[in-house]
Amino acid sequence: MYSVTLSPLAVRQLDMLNENQMKPIIRAFEVLKVNPRPSGVKKLKGRPGYRVRAGNYRIIYQIFDSELRINVLALGDRKDIYR
């Protein structure tokens, strides 16, 4: 099982969301702990990491298989996250 760590940016972005917005993101974290490359995951082009959907939100993260760790770089609304 992988551990999920959040970057300082991801922590700030998560703090700005209300409880209803957080629910799909927290569920996505639980899925990532078991399978860091679930169905629907995409490897990003032009920047390191992967992207997974959580409702209208996207989670950008890196996988460290040797450490069984996932580092969440950023998360946010689908229309804003790629800027």
Image (cartoon, rainbow, N blue to C red):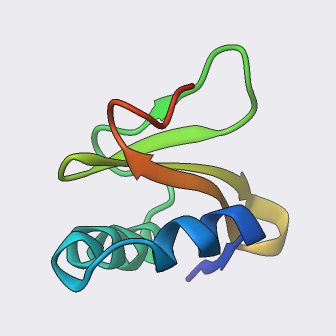
> Which residue is found at the position 27% from the left and 79% from the top?
18
- Asked if residue 56 lies left or right of residue 41, the reply is left
Expressed as whole percent of the image width and height from the top left, the position of residue 23 reads 22, 78
Provide residue 56's location: percent of width, then percent of height: 21, 46
Rendered position, 19 above or below 72: below
Front-lying residue, 10 or 67:
10
Quarter-of-image position of residue 7: bottom right
- Snapshot quadrant of residue 25: bottom left
Looking at the image, which is closer to me, 45 or 33? 45
The answer to which quarter of the image holds residue 69 is bottom right
How many numbered dots are placed on residues in this image? 0
Q: Decide if residue 75 is on the left or right side of residue 45.
A: left
Q: Find the residue positioned furthest to the top.
A: 46
Asked if 18 appears above or below 70 in the picture, the reply is below
Q: Is residue 56 above or below residue 66?
A: above
Residue 55 lies, in percent from the top left, at: 18, 52
Q: Is residue 7 visible?
A: no
* Position of the C terminus by quadrant: top right
Which residue is at 52% across, 27% downward?
82
Farthest residue to the right: give it. 66
> What residue is rendered at 43% in x and 34% in y?
80
- Quadrant of the drawing holding the N terminus: bottom right
Residue at image coords 48%, 37%: 81
